[in-house]
Amino acid sequence: MTKGEKKVLNGLLHKILEKRDGRCLKCGKTEWQMSHIYPKGRYRSMEFDPDNVKALCYACHLHWWHKNPIEAHEWLQIRMSDARLKRLKLMSQTTNKIDYKLIRLFLEQTLKEYD
């Protein structure tokens, strides 16, 4: 996947989170960034999955999510649906080839659902 393709997918994913979450899910700040539940470095096939991404502000992402894994896990169990977490766990145990066109189509369709 090229850098340009990755930029397009990240842009679509950011728009989805903007409509779905809209603010930091931990503290409510309106300035936020994308934070992956399953790390994108280790789980490449899940990098652009909207269910694997949540909105967290810089402070909550770096100083809470990454530094308090037990508390973050407990919070995640309360904040996210069981179905979403089970699907993510299943996805983490599979290896899928990343198909730019398919992912882009999926993200564009997901974005339309929020309109």
Image (spheres, rainbow, N blue to C red):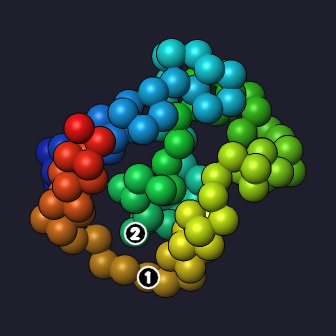
Q: Is 98 placed left or right of 32 in the picture? A: left
Residue 27: x and y, percent? 68, 22
The mark nearer the N terminus, 1 or 2, is 2
Residue found at x 16% / y 60%: 105
Residue found at x 30% / y 35%: 15
Q: Residues within 10 Å of mark 2 (few under 14, many from 20)?
A: some
Name the element at disc 2. Answer: helix
Q: Amino acid at mark 2?
A: Ser
Residue 111 badge: none
Asked if residue 14 can be seen in this view, the reply is no
Residue found at x 20% / y 55%: 109
Contact, mark 1 vs mark 2 (Cβ under 8 Å)? yes
Q: Nearer the viewer, residue 108 or 94?
A: 108
Residue farthest to the top?
Answer: 30
Above or below residue 22? Residue 44 is below
Q: How far separated are the C-alphas under marks 1 and 2?
A: 7 Å
Residue 58: x and y, percent? 59, 23
Residue found at x 82% / y 51%: 74
Mark 1 — residue? 95
Total marks in image: 2
Q: Is 77 placed left or right of 80 in the picture? A: right
Q: Is 17 placed left or right of 73 in the picture? A: left
Residue 45 badge: 2
Quadrant position of the N terminus in the picture: bottom left
Name the element at disc 1. Answer: loop
Q: Is 30 placed left or right of 7 in the picture? A: right
Quadrant position of the C terminus in the picture: top left
Instruction: Residue 90: name its quadrant.
Output: bottom right
